[in-house]
Image (cartoon, helix red, strand yellow):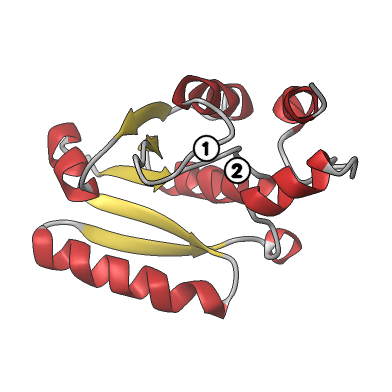
Amino acid sequence: MIKCVYPGSFDPITCGHLDVIERAAAMFYDVTVAVLVNKNKVPAFTVEQRMDFIRRSTKHLPGVKVDWFSGLLVDYMKSRGANVIIRGLRATADFEYEFQMAAMNARLAKDVETIFLMTDISHSFLRSSMDKELVAHGGKITGLVPPEIEEDVIKYFNR
């Protein structure tokens, strides 16, 4: 059985992320959404909050698990027995960076493949950072983040 991992910061999960997760879940029986804990970034939400947001947003998807990791993705992949990395692309601008990451991961672990999934065009502009900035300035984020977490994101920025 092929196990795949969709890594990211998911700070917070967006409808674009969810679109990629749903399509990966339609292709693979075992999908782990892995929240990256990056010591060089200060996220708005804790890893526990981000994992909770993802669990609530993906509860309709059997076979989707949520986990976290720090360090090298390929090391995490080995620990999970996973061999496919899922990466979402919004636009061609994402491709160069993602291609470089895929090449480095292939160099580090020859048995790991990267599959790129294009986000639905209606989500191609979404970024977690844009969503956070929008809500912090009183903008509406309906349709930008999954409805299961919208109220929590708004509350966080309006505290």
Report which quarter residue 104 is drawn in. Answer: bottom left
Residue 79: x %, y % from top left: 14, 34
How many other residues sit within 10 Å of disc 2, few (<14), some (14-19) or many (≥20)? some
Q: Amino acid at mark 2?
A: Leu
Return the mark for residue 130. none
Q: Residue at x 56, y 43 (%)?
A: 22
Q: Quadrant of the N terminus?
A: top left
Report which quarter residue 118 is drawn in. Answer: bottom right
Q: Residue at x 64, y 51 (%)?
A: 129
Check disc 1 and report its element: helix, strand or loop.
loop
Q: Residue at x 24, y 47 (%)?
A: 73
**Residue 9, can we see it?**
yes
Q: Nearer the viewer, residue 67 or 48?
A: 48
Residue 144: x %, y % from top left: 76, 46
- Mark 1 to mark 2 CA distance (whole Å): 19 Å
Q: Is residue 4 left or right of residue 120?
A: left
- Where 95 sits versus 46, above or below? below
Residue 24: x %, y % from top left: 46, 48
Q: Amino acid at mark 1?
A: Pro
Q: Nearer the viewer, residue 22 or 54?
A: 54
Per the image, the residue denoted by label 2 is 18
- Tell us which disc is closer to us: 1 or 2: 1
**Residue 110, can we see it?**
no
Q: Residue at x 70, y 66 (%)?
A: 121
Per the image, the residue denoted by label 1 is 43
